[in-house]
């Protein structure tokens, strides 16, 4: 039994026609998977976050983005279809989110922008409605430097908190929440007592 070429295209034109046919079939399959089926915004956001976005970001970013999605976006989404979302709807959603914290609308807009960019780039929607949505920014409060007595009082109260270790790392190492959540045991040098 011999091996040899059993098929293929005889000419470049024939190959080009075959490519066009395969591209059309691919588009039809993609449309059957997404475009022809009604996709709710809530379903899209869950699927996008857990199956696409989580594979691209660090664990600390994942935790922050998941918190934003679950606490500041999903409670206000409702039963709207992905392709029915417009800038007015996004503005209403962000307005509701803005009542939660000083940064919730700003962070919600960031996550929605990434998600809708993905939907746009993959032809699930015709345009990204977040681009024209109202921008939010928070005013940073001035830092208050604690004196020694205030630090002692703070640590005494914080010692009963389940996040006491995180508080110590932030206070004495200057680490942000994302940096603390991203720590690994390998980052600690137990002999030199350094991080």
Image (cartoon, rainbow, N blue to C red):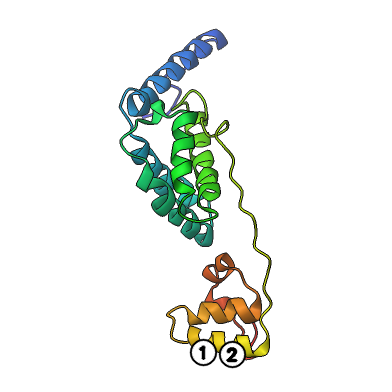
Asked if one can make out residue 192 in the rendered structure from this viewpoint, the answer is no
Pick whichever, 18 or 113, lies toward us.
Answer: 113
Residue 26, image x, y percentages? 41, 23
| SS class, disc 1 | helix
Residue 29: which quarter of the image?
A: top left
How many marks overall? 2
Q: Is residue 16 above or below residue 108?
A: above
Residue 105, image x, y percentages? 51, 47
- Seen at 35% across and 30% down, the residue is 81
Tell me the quarter of the image containing the C terminus: bottom right
Residue 10, image x, y percentages? 51, 11
* Contact check, label 2 and label 1, Cβ < 8 Å: yes
Q: Is residue 145 above or below residue 79?
A: below
Q: Which residue is mark 1?
A: 156
Q: Is residue 177 above or below residue 126?
A: below
Tell me the quarter of the image containing the N terminus: top left
**Horizontal arrangement in the rendering, residue 32 relative to residue 92 (left or right):** left
Pick whichever, 13 or 127, lies toward us.
Answer: 127
- Seen at 55% across and 84% down, the residue is 154
Quick one: label 2, few (<14), some, or many (20+) residues within 10 Å?
Answer: few
Asked if one can make out residue 92 in the rendered structure from this viewpoint, the answer is yes
Residue 144, image x, y percentages? 67, 73
Q: Which residue is mark 2?
A: 152
**Horizontal arrangement in the rendering, residue 20 relative to residue 138 (left or right):** left
Residue 115, numbered label: none
Whole-number angstrom distance, CA of label 2 to CA of label 1:
6 Å
- Seen at 49% across and 83% down, the residue is 158
Quick one: label 1, few (<14), some, or many (20+) residues within 10 Å?
Answer: few
| SS class, disc 2 | helix
């Amino acid at each position: 039994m011999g091996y040899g070429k059993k098929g293929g295209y005889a000419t470049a034109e024939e190959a080009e026609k075959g490519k066009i046919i395969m591209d059309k079939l691919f588009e039809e399959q993609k449309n059957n998977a997404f475009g022809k089926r009604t996709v709710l915004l809530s379903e899209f956001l869950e699927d996008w976050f857990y199956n696409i976005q989580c594979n691209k970001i660090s664990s600390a970013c994942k935790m922050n983005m998941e918190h934003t999605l679950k606490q500041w976006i999903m409670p206000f989404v409702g039963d709207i279809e992905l392709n029915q979302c417009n800038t007015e709807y996004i503005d209403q959603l962000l307005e509701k989110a803005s009542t939660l914290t000083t940064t919730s609308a700003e962070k919600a807009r960031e996550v929605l922008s990434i998600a809708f960019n993905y939907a746009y780039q993959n032809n699930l929607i015709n345009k990204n409605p977040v681009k024209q949505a109202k921008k939010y920014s928070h005013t940073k409060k001035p830092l208050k430097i604690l004196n020694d007595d205030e630090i002692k009082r703070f640590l005494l109260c914080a010692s009963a908190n389940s996040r006491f270790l995180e508080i110590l790392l932030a206070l004495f190492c200057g680490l942000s929440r994302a940096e603390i959540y991203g720590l690994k045991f390998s980052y600690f040098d137990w002999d030199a007592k350094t991080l």
